[in-house]
Image (cartoon, rainbow, N blue to C red):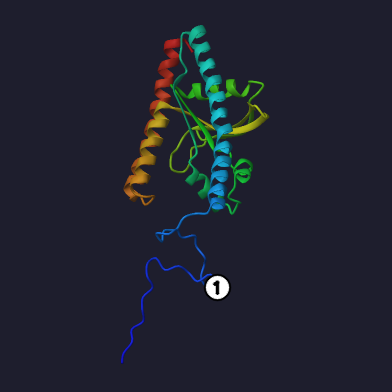
Amino acid sequence: MSTTKQQPHPQHRPDPEDPEEPVLPFDAEGEITPSPEVLESAFEAGRKLHEGFLPYRFAIQEILTKLEILRDEIAAVEAYNPIEHLTSRVKSLDSIVGKLRRRGLPLNVASMHENLDDIAGVRVTCSFIDDTYRMQQLLSAQPDVQTLQIKDYIAEPKQNGYRGLHAIVETPVHLSTGSRPIRVEIQFRTIAMDFWASLEHKTFYKYEGEVPPHLVSELADAAQTANLLDRRMEAIHRDIRGG
């Protein structure tokens, strides 16, 4: 008489006496349900993560307010607006986790605070190249803004042609529990630089990083063209405003 091995039922519950099988919390319907302890732990982790992001949102508000005041003052005094657009973002959790993993760093809120400079980001799109330097210098001159790092990709563009002025700054965020210094990455670009960077980003996203060589070459040429346009428009602007 032949026998066939019975397949385990989809709702098979592991034997708690068998050390080879994990004991999972099943309800009466055979569904896995987390224990109150697991739920409480997950809730607490989510709460801490939410609180960990709050200072970065507040730091962005601080920086944006400072830039808006500088913009409005220059517009009132000089009848000229040096800033075309202000945008901001807080880095996504997936991006933060990926960056920490690539660096072999612990995956927790403390590690995020200590090791990442670009969780909070602000982009300042200016009309002309001179405006990018001017706004960066005016912002850094404020007593509660400490500039930690400057990367001048306008003077020395990246290999792919990217141009922009990047600054890592630190500003205090005043919470109910006290003041806390928070780092913010600020990118200063002209309209032409921002347009090129947006197109380059979309191209690499579409091709998942494997961009055909002819498009890489086209983008590099376009970066040069954008720079020439910036220089010509700035020369015209100086002539109009008398230097």
| Amino acid at dot 1 | Glu
Up the image or down, 78 lies above or below 25; here it is: above
Q: How many marks?
A: 1
At which x and y percent is residue 138? 58, 20
Question: In the picture, residue 221 is in which quadrant?
Answer: top left
At which x and y percent is residue 161? 43, 39
At 56% from the left edge and 28% from the top edge, which residue is drawn? 58
At which x and y percent is residue 189? 46, 29
Answer left or right for 6 relative to 99: left
Crowd tier of the residue under label 1, counting other residues whose Cα lies within 10 Å: few below 14, some 14–19, many 20 or above: few
Answer left or right for 111 relative to 219: right
Answer left or right for 222 relative to 159: left
Q: Which residue corresponds to mark 1?
A: 17
The answer, for residue 167, to whether it is visible in the render is no
Q: Secondary structure at mark 1?
A: loop
Between 121 and 94, the one nearer to me in the picture: 94
Q: Furthest-right residue in view?
A: 178
Question: In the picture, residue 7 is in which quadrant?
Answer: bottom left
At 37% from the left edge and 70% from the top edge, which residue is drawn? 9
Q: Furthest-front residue in view?
A: 28
Between 206 and 225, the one nearer to me in the picture: 206
The answer, for residue 44, to whether it is visible in the render is yes
Between 161 and 12, the one nearer to me in the picture: 12
At 38% from the left edge and 73% from the top edge, which residue is drawn? 8
Up the image or down, 68 lies above or below 182; here it is: above
Up the image or down, 73 lies above or below 161; here it is: above
Quadrant for the N terminus in the image: bottom left
